[in-house]
Image (cartoon, rainbow, N blue to C red):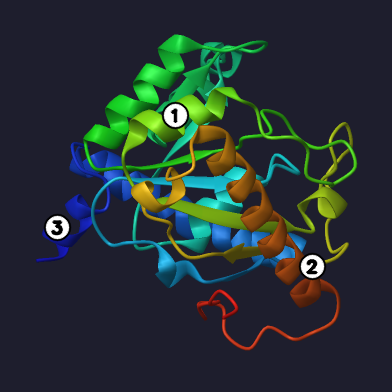
């Protein structure tokens, strides 16, 4: 029963890979909580089964583990720079954590094809539409290449907002431990047909607006209002 539930988290992976991912997730959650004040909300909004494309803003190196650890009911596939896979120690690690190599600079048809292939297996794939980490913590423009993934993925899209990661580990800077709070706010999944009803450009604009809204919520949780429940769901305003 336990093994069956574990296999559902990431279809097609070996049992050893699944167990290693779970160990890393627990370790990373504890470490980020202690060092960076890591908090998360809305993790139960992630569907339990089927392909899901998760879309988030990009502030820091911490973003992939922050988002992945926020939704422990599933295991994620992550995007990572192709050059990182050449490292003797980092390459095997990120491969074991279900990472997808992506070339730097410009579009990468091979990585897009691989993302779609993994979604077809019923997995959860995390992408950062800005393409790179923000230099000032603000949300940049979403790359048009993401519209191609949205059009071909034919699966729900789950928006996520990240706040505080830039402050605790800024681009070009060193980690600032015990410096503040890094918060992840998970939104609600958007059905593919609903998202794409006005075309890919409108879908991209809507996703950026939704991610921005979730970042604002995470900002409030981080800077002022207390977090009542780590896994509490946030609903869209009526």
- The residue at which mark 2 appears reads as 219
Question: Could you tell me if residue 231 is visible in this image?
Answer: yes
- Observer-nearest of 21 and 67: 67
| The C terminus: image quadrant | bottom right
Q: Marks 2/1: CA distance?
A: 28 Å
Q: Residue at x 90, y 42 (%)?
A: 136
Q: Residue at x 43, y 56 (%)?
A: 190
Secondary structure beneath dot 2 equals helix
- The residue at which mark 1 appears reads as 149
| Proximity of marks 3 and 1: CB atoms separated by less than 8 Å | no
Residue 63 relative to residue 55: left or right: right
| The N terminus: image quadrant | bottom left
- Observer-nearest of 236 and 174: 236
Question: Disc number at residue 58?
Answer: none
Question: Which one is earlier in the sequence, the residue at label 2 or at label 1?
Answer: 1
Sort mark 2 into few (<14), some (14-19) or many (20+) by Cα contacts within 10 Å: many
Question: Residue 124, located in which quarter of the rendered image?
Answer: top left
- The residue at which mark 3 appears reads as 3
Question: Could you tell me if residue 176 is visible in this image?
Answer: no
Question: Which one is earlier in the sequence, the residue at label 3 or at label 2?
Answer: 3
| Proximity of marks 3 and 2: CB atoms separated by less than 8 Å | no
Q: Residue at x 48, y 30 (%)?
A: 94
Residue 205 lies, in percent from the top left, at 64, 43
């Amino acid at each position: 029963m336990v093994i069956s539930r574990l296999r559902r988290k990431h279809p097609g992976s070996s049992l050893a890979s699944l167990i290693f991912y779970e160990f890393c997730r627990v370790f990373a959650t504890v470490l980020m909580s202690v060092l960076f004040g890591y908090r998360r909300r809305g993790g139960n909004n992630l569907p339990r089964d089927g392909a899901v494309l998760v879309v988030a803003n990009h502030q820091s190196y911490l973003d992939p583990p922050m988002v992945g650890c926020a939704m422990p009911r599933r295991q994620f596939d992550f995007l990572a720079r192709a050059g990182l896979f050449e490292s003797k120690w980092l390459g095997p690690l990120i491969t074991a954590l279900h990472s997808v190599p992506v070339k730097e600079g410009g579009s990468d048809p091979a990585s897009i094809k691989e993302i779609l292939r993994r979604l077809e297996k019923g997995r959860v794939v995390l992408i950062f539409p800005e393409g790179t980490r923000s230099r000032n913590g603000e949300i940049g423009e979403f790359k048009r290449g993401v519209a191609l993934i949205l059009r071909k993925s034919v699966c729900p899209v789950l928006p996520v907002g990240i706040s505080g990661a830039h402050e605790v580990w800024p681009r070009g800077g060193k980690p600032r431990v015990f410096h503040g709070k890094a918060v992840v706010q998970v939104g609600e999944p958007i059905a593919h047909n609903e998202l794409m009803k006005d075309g890919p450009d409108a879908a991209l604009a809507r996703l950026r607006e939704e991610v921005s809204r979730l970042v604002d919520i995470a900002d409030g949780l981080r800077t002022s209002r207390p977090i009542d429940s780590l896994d509490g769901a946030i609903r869209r305003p009526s």
